[in-house]
Image (spheres, helix red, strand yellow):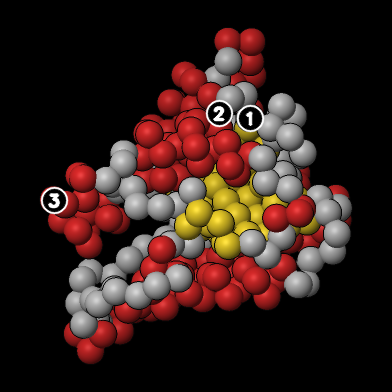
Amino acid sequence: MGETQLKTIMITGVSRGLGRVLALEIARRGHSVVGCARSQEKLHALMADLTRDDPPSSSSSSSSKHLLKHLDVRSDNSMKEFARLLVEERKIPDIIVNNAGTINKNNKIWAVPAEEFDMVIDTNIKGTANILRHFLPLLIEKKQGIVVNISSGWGRSAAAEVAPYCASKWAIEGLSKSVAKELPPGLAIVALNPGVVNTDMLASCFGSNSALYQSPESWAPRAATMILNLTSEDNGASLTI
């Protein structure tokens, strides 16, 4: 599938950070966005921006072109219902971007509370698995589709005080490569390192130094182009924007 063909792109964690700017860039190019996030307020704001960024020709149907739901990827049942909803709405995605993620506060592993460790693992690994469990069968049924699991440079290297996050992103790399061996022809799953981008998550690690890195707005066009042009030949790849 080339980028010229209009697609439905699903993005988890769509209401903020990289998910939000990616959604806006993809919508600006005429594609449909479906997604979920934990903040209803931020989802309302994003929907308003998506509607504003729709091409004029589609303004009359912009309210139904995109679909955003207030859901948490950590809930397997919620992801099951989300998949069912997208089937009913005829919005089965062509590309899924597993973007929802969180990071622990900088701390040595023995000082990270169990609840915080669980939050990272439950969101970054189990949340991704919940999406794969309920959405891969839909892609398999239609014999095509791309899954992009957002990884990190820290999924291929390591740093002190972010051990839970590093562990979760190393897991995403392994998960992606393993699932790639399970997919039938026509589908692909990749691990994608977005690079270092000045988001709230980066600021939690780097403090004011995060301002030295690229903005999400400058990142989004390159990210969208790469994601929209992925094909089944990329299956199993570890890529970097």
- Indicate the position of residue 219 as horizontal and vertical percent values: 41, 39
Residue beneath label 3, please? 208
N-terminal of the two: label 1 or label 3? 1
Examine the rendering and report whether any part of residue 212 can be seen: yes
Which residue, as the protein is rendered here, is positioned at the far top?
A: 56
Q: Residues within 10 Å of mark 2 (few under 14, many from 20)?
A: many
Q: Nearer the viewer, mark 3 or mark 2?
A: 3
Residue at figure coordinates x 76%, y 54% from the top left: 233
The residue most toward the bottom is: 110
| Mark 2 and mark 1 residues within 8 Å of each other at the beta carbon | yes
Which residue is disc 2 drawn over?
Answer: 27
Q: Quadrant of residue 112?
A: bottom left
Cα–Cα gap, marks 2 and 1: 5 Å
59 vs 90, left or right, is left
- Give the residue type at disc 2: Ala
Q: Residue 31 — which label?
A: 1
Q: Residue at x 67, y 46 (%)?
A: 230
Which of discs 1 and 3 lies nearer the camera? The answer is 3
Identify residue type, mark 1: His
- Residue 187, compared with residue 56, is above or below; it is below
Q: Is residue 67 above or below residue 71?
A: above
Q: Residue 99: x percent and y percent?
A: 49, 54
Do residues under tags 1 and 3 come within 8 Å of each other at their CB atoms? Answer: no
**Residue drawn at point x = 58 percent, y = 15 percent:** 55
Tally of numbered tags: 3
Q: Tell me which amino acid carries mark 3.
A: Ser
